[in-house]
Image: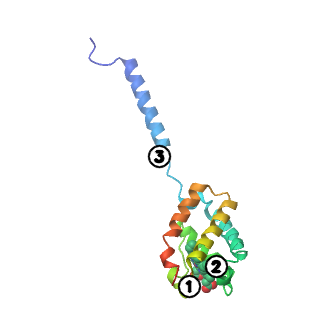
């Protein structure tokens, strides 16, 4: 009876260990952020543009935006969407409460805006799972936006 494995066996064992280490490492590539799954800076800018076009033709909400500066809205919404999806941006706009206070945004208007964003993300070919994660983050902001 041999107390130690043969040279051949231990070489096989070493190869298997190295292989599993290698495979283990290849599985360790960091998961993409939600921001990256939206297509990073280009993707977020494109979604925002499509979103603005949806709002512009949405009679349920367009009145809210009558006196708004679309250039500012675009810039700040891009920053905000980037921030809430873990992108590398610092949001420089006003707080959700400060912007939306006095607008009396209704439940229906909030749903309409969310639907407009879904439409924009669909047109931008964002995967459904990714869309749902974005919507989940927006839903958390609801109390800071409606009926203020
Ligand atoms: C889904 C949640 C929403 C998010 C994340 C959001 C985010 C934002 C952001 C980032 C801005 C720009 C802030 C700034 O200029 O400093 C903004 C402005 C604005 N939002 Fe929202 N918003 C949401 C829902 C709504 C809803 C439901 C309405 C009304 C139907 C609305 C109406 C407006 C209007 C009118 C402005 C422009 C205000 C102005 O020009 O002074 N928002 N929003």
125 vs 35, nearest the viewer: 125
Front: mark 3 or 2: 2
Q: Which residue lies furthest to the top in this view?
A: 1
Marks 1 and 3 in Cβ contact (< 8 Å): no
Q: Distance between the residues labelled 3 and 2?
A: 38 Å
Whichever of callouts 1 and 2 sits on the residue coming sooner in the sequence is: 2
Q: How crowded is mark 2: few (under 14 residues within 10 Å), some or many (20 or more)?
A: some
Which mark is drawn over residue 73? 2
Task: State the SS at label 2.
Answer: helix
* Residue at left offset 56%, top offset 85%: 104
Q: Residues within 10 Å of mark 1 (few under 14, many from 20)?
A: few
Q: How far apart are marks 1 and 3 (CA)?
A: 47 Å
- 56 left or right of 28? right
Front: mark 1 or 3: 1
Marks 3 and 2 in Cβ contact (< 8 Å): no
In the displayed structure, 111 sits above or below 64; it is above
Mark 1 CB lies closer than 8 A to ligand 1: no
Q: Mark 1 points at which residue?
A: 104
| Rendering coords of residue 15 (x, y %) | 44, 28
Where, quadrant-wise, is the N terminus in this rendering? top left
Does the rendering let one see residue 86? no
Mark 2 CB lies closer than 8 A to ligand 1: yes
In the displayed structure, 10 sits above or below 38; it is above
Which mark is drawn over residue 84? none
């Amino acid at each position: 009876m041999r107390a130690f494995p043969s040279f051949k066996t231990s070489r096989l064992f070493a190869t298997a260990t190295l292989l599993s280490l290698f495979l283990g490492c290849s599985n360790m590539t960091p998961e993409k952020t939600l921001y990256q799954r939206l297509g990073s800076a280009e993707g977020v800018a494109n979604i925002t543009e499509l979103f603005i076009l949806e709002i512009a033709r949405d009679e349920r909400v367009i009145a809210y935006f009558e006196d708004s500066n679309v250039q500012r809205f675009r810039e700040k919404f891009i920053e905000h969407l980037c921030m809430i999806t873990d992108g590398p941006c610092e949001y420089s706009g006003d707080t959700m409460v400060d912007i939306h206070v006095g607008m009396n945004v209704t439940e229906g208007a909030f749903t309409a805006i969310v639907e407009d964003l879904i439409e924009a993300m669909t047109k931008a070919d964002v995967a459904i799972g990714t869309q749902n994660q974005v919507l989940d983050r927006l839903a958390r902001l609801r109390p800071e936006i409606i009926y203020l």
